[in-house]
Each structure stands twice: as C-alpha cells, then as structure tokens.
Amino acid sequence: MQSALCDAVIAVIGANGRSGRALCHALLGLGYRVIAVVRNTQTLEPDIARRSYIIRQADLTRQDSLAPALQGASLVINTAHARFLPAILAATSAPVVALGSTRKFTRWPDAHGMGVSMGEAALQQDGRPSLILHPTMIYGAQGENNVQRLAALLKKLPCVPLPNGGSFLVQPINQSDVTRSLVVAAELMMAGTIKKPESIVIAGPEAVTYSTFIRMIVSFAGMKQRPVFAVPVWLLLAASCVMRFIPGLPRIEAAEVRRLTENKNFNIELMKEKLNINPMPLTQGLKELFDGECR
C-alpha cells in the first residue's frame, strides 16, 4: 500500500491546524508528496513549508479558490471542519479522507455536530470512495485546548463540581493515534481497498468516568487532588455564565456543560480491524503530555 501512496500527490486541507500539522509531519517523514492547503500561507509551520511539494492558499468558503488549490491532487485529506466537505467534493474528483467528530452523536446538537453530519451526508450522496474518521476528544496535540485548558481550570479550583459526581463516561484519543488513523486511511484509499463512502469512529482503548479523567489530569499535572462532588446541571450552567466575566478563568460554554451529562463511550472494533490500530492507553498519553510540558 505504501508504494501506491508514495506515488500520490496528497492535498492536506488545514495543514496549519493541530491535526493538519501532525499529519503533514507524518506524511513528509514517510517521504510522501504533500500539497499544504492553508488559508494564510504566513501561518504555515516553517518546516512544513520547506518540505512540502506545493503550498497553496485557499478560502474554504470560496469555491473559486478551492478548486485551483486541489488541482493535481490524487488524494485529498480534509483536517478542517467537515462542514466544508460539500465544497471540497465540488472542487475535486479525487477520493477523500476526512476528519469528522463524535460530536455528531450528542443529544445536544450544535453547529459543530450538525456540520459534521452534513459533511458525512455529502460524502454518502456523492458516492465516490471516501473515508471519514470520527474522533472523540483529541488530546496531546501541540497547542490542543482540551486537556491543557482543563488543567488550567483545575489549578484555579479547590474542588471540582460535576453533574452526577462525574459518573458519565469519556474516551479521549491521543493525537498520535488520530494521525496514524489518517495515514492508514490514506493508504487504504490509494490501494483501492475503499470502494464506497465509509465512516469509522476512532477513540481511546477504553472509557473512564469523567471524575477519573479529572483525577488523572490532576495527578499527571503534579497538582494536589481536588475533591469531586455532585452538583445540579442548572447550577453549573449558571456558573458558566458568570465565569466568562471573571478575568483569568477559562470560558466554558453551556453546551460543554450539557455534554457532561451524557456518556461518550464508543466501540472501536472497526478501528482495530479496518485500520489495524490499537490506541494508546490514557495513562500513557497523559504522562507523555505532561512530561513534555515540563521539559
């Protein structure tokens, strides 16, 4: 499969984003030709800019700039939001690999989740070989704002208020596993293994309760443990409104609070079977993340 991919010209949309940067480094490290597609070429990481086959600028909201940016690509990988997939499909005839999100499964739909569903529907309707990967919460990327933002908030809290005491489940995935999944998806696509639109949920190896997740972050970040206690959702919603007016406190949206009241655990057998990836344990990923920050 790798030889077929080496002959390919791969356009990576969102090459200056967190997942896009990680993917570009992986593909370039393996010797693949990459078209780095970004909105602003000045923001592209210098090492990626130096090693890329071509750098092209595109505004995903403008069809006239998107089609020229994807010209000559034998495979397109979209690491930008999946809501742009209809425009991408209209701009190229190449097969597509895309990042979606398990946000599409939430009981509290928002623009992000609905955009993912719309993008996946566009792939299904188009019918060309494609693969959309739906990751859970991604952590461990350079500049990611999930675990780091949570750790920053925990440093300011003497205790941790959570709906139902944090008994709902979460199943984060390390950025390295997202990157590996995208590379394998590209290999499968170029090998002709994927014949029609498919989707796969990618997640960590096992789910943990949110309270356990919090305690793990506190421990690996070198903080003293904070007591976790149950609070009603309405109180947390009120607190999220107040926190946005207090300087120094991270902003928490009401939708984020509501999503704390649903289980986010997923079956990853398809990830293991189709992509042949056994994801990194959460303990290992958090240890590497916080050890790296201390260096």
Image (tube, rainbow, N blue to C red):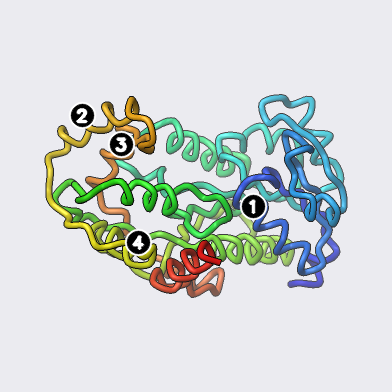
Element type at mark 3 = loop
- Mark earlier in primary sequence (4, 1): 1
Numbered mark located on residue 108 in the image: 3
The crowd level at tag 3 (other Cα within 10 Å; few <14, some 14-19, many 20+) is: some
Depth check: give the residue in front, 57 or 121.
57
Q: What residue did someone put label 1 on? A: 97
Mark 4: which secondary structure? Answer: helix
Kindly identify the amino acid type of the residue bearing the numbered disc 2.
Ala
**Neighbour tally class for label 1: few under 14, some 14-19, many 20 plus, Cα within 10 Å:** many
Closer to the chain start, of discs 4 and 2, is: 4
Left or right of 166 in this view: 20:
right
Q: Is residue 211 above or below residue 77?
A: below
The residue tagged 2 is 238
Circle 4 sits on which residue?
Answer: 217
Give, as a three-letter code, the residue at label 4. Ile
> Spatial distance from mark 3 to mark 2, Cα to Cα?
18 Å
The answer to which image quadrant residue 173 occupies is bottom left
Q: Amino acid at mark 1?
A: Val
Residue 288 image point, x, y percent: 49, 70
User: Between marks 4 and 1, how big is the CA–CA gap?
Assistant: 32 Å
Q: Secondary structure at mark 1?
A: strand
For label 2, count other residues whose C-alpha is less than 10 Å away and answer few (under 14), some (14-19) or many (20+).
Answer: few
Q: Are marks 3 and 2 in contact (CB under 8 Å)?
A: no
Q: Is residue 153 or residue 247 the one in the foreground?
A: 247
